[in-house]
Amino acid sequence: MKEIIRFLSSVLYYVEERRYPLAVAFKRSLNLNRPRGVDSNLLFEYARQLLLSYYSLPQARRTVRIKYWLENKGNLNVSFPQWMEKKLGSLLDVNALKSSLKEKTVWIRVNLLKADIDKIIRELERYNVEFEIDKDLYYMIKVKEPQIRLSSLDIVKECRIIPQDKASSLVVEALRPQIKERLVELSSAPGIKASLYMMLTENKNEVFLADIDFNRISKEMILLKRCGVDMNKVHIVHQDSVRNSLIKADKVLLDAPCSSSGMINNDPSILITLNSCEKVDKFSKLQKTLLREAVNMKASDVVYSVCSLFPEEGEEIIDEYYEIAERPFDNYNYGYPNFRSSFKSNRVFPHIDFTEGFFISRLKLTRL
Ligand SMILES: C[S@@+](CC[C@H](N)C(=O)[O-])C[C@H]1O[C@@H](n2cnc3c(N)ncnc32)[C@H](O)[C@@H]1O
């Protein structure tokens, strides 16, 4: 028990003091304070649940809070900071959202560049993984409450399946990928959507992948190679897309930097590190500028997406272009009501779609 308390204290320290995302805080803590004989899958779930009930804990030293959590974990509710609760309360069913966060749904994508679906299904059955093939996207598989660490499986290590949320795949589907078109992605790292785009276009298209962060670009190149993407078709551009140097494309993807509030189920550290509306407004300004750059390109379509639950990063951004915006999917929710672009966008949610929370809209530049 002492070792678990030390481990969770370390996770909490990295989140509270260093503002690290859960995955990084977890990895560092595992390296420093790994409790003996406890499965790391269970430890991750402990850390995730601890952060989800962070605001239900007493105000006390870290170790006291963790002891309290361990004694009461079965009865503690998911809790949001007040400002977030208030803000989301007028937009969605916060209680439904909170209860959905307790359960963990993991999505995996069959990487058709390296594997075929039937073989993967047989392998998952062999590992006794309970799963469901998605009804909309034939290559997506939903794993509910996974009992084993998927990352430990050979099929993941070999990139024959890739952990990727269904909402992230919907963003790529919104581009309606066609063979022989050129795609520009203005903020592309670590390349998970680009790798799906290359899969759907059978490695035949040229893609121009931009990002401001050199380290993330390096990881992107490694990921794309491991996924079996034809690197001869990939052009990496290290740029601040606020001053975009790319002029022409058929389609543009702007999967913009955002508050990540739609990813609370996978990374509840956001509840602690995203501590004010000010940060959301800052992202909103950057998103507006990046979208202006995207719209100024010679292209037919721009897909705009964010993994955010806040309208400042979604509907309010698209409102400026509502005349040329269109709703990518008929079978998913509209954007939040009372915005000009409400009916010209989609929102998917953890409590409705079992996905991360995403906003997606498509602009038809040919209508300008
Ligand atoms: C949501 S992530 C993109 C995820 C990526 N589309 C994928 O699916 O793997 C946002 C990215 O925007 C990048 N970014 C932030 N500000 C930027 C800017 N001014 N210009 C270009 N990229 C930027 C970040 O480095 C980050 O990699």
Image: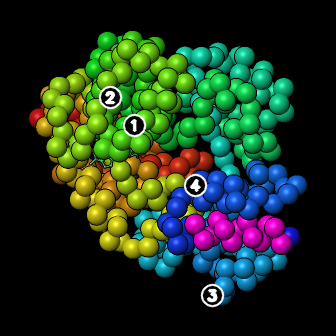
| Mark 4 / mark 3, whichever is N-terminal | 4
Say which mark, if any, is on residue 253: none
Residue denoted by label 3: 59
In front of the other: 281 or 95 = 281
| Element assignment for label 3 | loop
Which kind of residue does numbered mark 1 sit on?
Answer: Ile
| Mark 2 / mark 4, whichever is N-terminal | 4
Label 2, label 4: how far apart the Cα atoms are: 26 Å
Residue denoted by label 4: 24
Kindly indicate the quadrant of the structure image that contains residue 324: top left
Q: In this rendering, would 269 be left or right of 183?
A: right
Would residue 153 be counted in the magenta stretch?
Answer: no
Where is residue 308 drawn, in percent x and y? 42, 55
Residue denoted by label 1: 217
Write the start and end of the magenta stretch as one range: 2-14
- For the N terminus, the image quarter is bottom right
Disc 2, disc 4: CB below 8 Å?
Answer: no
Residue drawn at (51%, 76%) of the image: 81
Where is residue 41 drawn, in percent x and y? 76, 50
